[in-house]
Each structure stands twice: as structure tokens, then as C-alpha cells.
Amino acid sequence: MFFILIKKSKCALRTKLKCAICSENVSMRYNPMEEWSIDGVLCGDCYSKKLSEYYPGIHKQINKK
Ligand SMILES: [Zn+2]
């Protein structure tokens, strides 16, 4: 039982992806919007940066400080 779980998680780690913008390893991948014309996946940081670039309204609420 235990070993099966380990095998599964290793399998998931094999699909290492790099962010199309900052080239960091992406653990939680985000698919870019079509209109961003980005090939590949984005990390959370770059994704939210892009989001706020393209849709400034959306992030105003989240970035309240
Ligand atoms: Zn990134």
C-alpha cells in the first residue's frame, strides 16, 4: 500500500515543467490564455502577473494591502 503511493507520486514528479516566462520549475501549472501567445505553461507568479497586466481590474481586489 505504502509503496504504491510512493510510485504514484514519483510518476507525477517526472512530468517536470518549466515556466515559459521565468523558467522556474512549475509545481502547480497554469495554462496561459490564448491571447497572451505564450507557448508552454506558467508558474503561479507569472500567471498572476500576466493576469494583472491583461486584466488590471481582476487583481485589484486580491492585491489589497
Ligand atoms: Zn514563472
Image (cartoon, grey):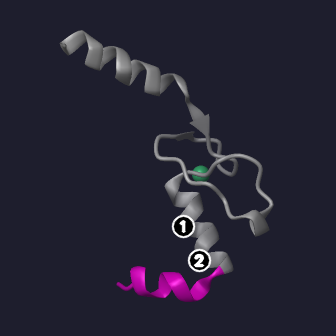
Provide residue 47's location: percent of width, then percent of height: 58, 61
> Residue 52 versus residue 3: which sits nearer the camera?
3
> Residue 11 versus residue 28: which sits nearer the camera?
11
Provide residue 55's location: percent of width, then percent of height: 63, 82
Q: Which residue appears at 53% of the width and 47% of the height? A: 29
Q: Amino acid at mark 2?
A: Ser
Mark 2, other Cα within 10 Å: few <14 / some 14–19 / many ≥20: some
SS class, disc 1 = helix
Q: In the shown orientation, is residue 35 left or right of residue 1?
A: right
Q: Is residue 15 magenta?
A: no
Q: Which residue appears at 28% of the width and 14% of the height? A: 4
Q: In the shown orientation, is residue 37 left or right of residue 42?
A: right
Q: Which mark is residue 52?
A: 2
Per the image, the residue denoted by label 1 is 48
Q: Which residue appears at 47% of the width and 41% of the height? A: 27
- 31 to 65, vertically: above or below: above
Q: How many numbered tags mark residues here? A: 2
Q: In the shown orientation, is residue 50 left or right of residue 25?
A: right
In the picture, which quadrant includes the C terminus? Answer: bottom left
Provide residue 44's location: percent of width, then percent of height: 50, 56
Marks 2 and 1 sit apart, C-alpha to C-alpha, by: 6 Å
| Residue 23 location, quadrant | top right
Q: Amino acid at mark 1?
A: Ser
The outermost residue toward the right is 37
In the picture, which quadrant includes the N terminus? Answer: top left
Residues drawn in magenta? 55-65
